[in-house]
Amino acid sequence: MQLQIIHNKIYDIREEKVMLDFDLAELYEVETRIFNQAVKRNLENFPKDFMFRITSKEWEELSSSQIVMMDFPKNRTGKYLPYAFTEHGVAMLASILKSEKARKMNIAIIRAFIALRKLAKKNNELIELIKELRGRIDEHDVQFAGIYDAIENLLDEKVNQTSWENRERIGYKK
């Protein structure tokens, strides 16, 4: 159940799987403000590939998305736009959030990211298999077309050889 809750809080932004500050704060059971203060006190631990502030456009796309839960906060603007944490950023949170709850939650979140990676790998394998099957089917379509053409040619020759007038009559004769 906890894994599903975490999965629901992982978003795709800038082609990255990320979690937003207010979702992480909720999982760690702290206020978003306090969570962000702890992060700001340790900004050197969070380079741009670990954490970034989302843009207004990204926020609008997220908050209008049908996937997002109903309690998604919609009234964020300007400097109050949330921070997005990549998997590495979430892992780095363990170094600044020292509570027992934070350590356990970090482990659960990292496991959720790992599960998503495994799922993506399986999806890629399925996509490759489908492409391979499509290639085989395309080859078969060409072969079937050749067979159908040959059958049609044979039927056309047979029809041309047997004219309607020269056929052997069956049934009632006059």
Image (cartoon, rainbow, N blue to C red):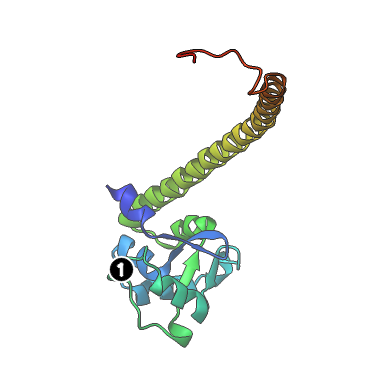
**Residue 147 coordinates in the image, percent (x, y):** 68, 24
Q: Name which quarter of the figure residue 132 lies in.
A: top right
Q: Nearer the viewer, residue 102 or 82?
A: 82
Q: On screen, 170 above or below 54?
A: above
Label 1 residue SS: loop
Q: Name which quarter of the figure residue 65 lies in.
A: bottom left
Q: How many marks?
A: 1
Which amino acid, mark 1? Answer: Val
Q: Name which quarter of the figure residue 162 lies in.
A: top right
Q: Residue at x 36, y 77 (%)?
A: 33
**Residue 92 coordinates in the image, percent (x, y):** 50, 58
Q: Residue at x 49, y 15 (%)?
A: 174
Q: Nearer the viewer, residue 77 or 125?
A: 125
Q: On screen, 145 above or below 17?
A: above
Left or right of residue 137: residue 95: left
Q: Nearer the viewer, residue 132 or 62?
A: 132
Give the labeled residue for mark 1: 30
**Residue 52 coordinates in the image, percent (x, y):** 54, 71
Label 1 packing within 10 angstroms: few (<14), some (14-19), many (20+):
some
Farthest residue in the front direction? 174
Q: On screen, 108 above or below 160?
A: below
Q: Residue at x 71, y 24 (%)?
A: 160
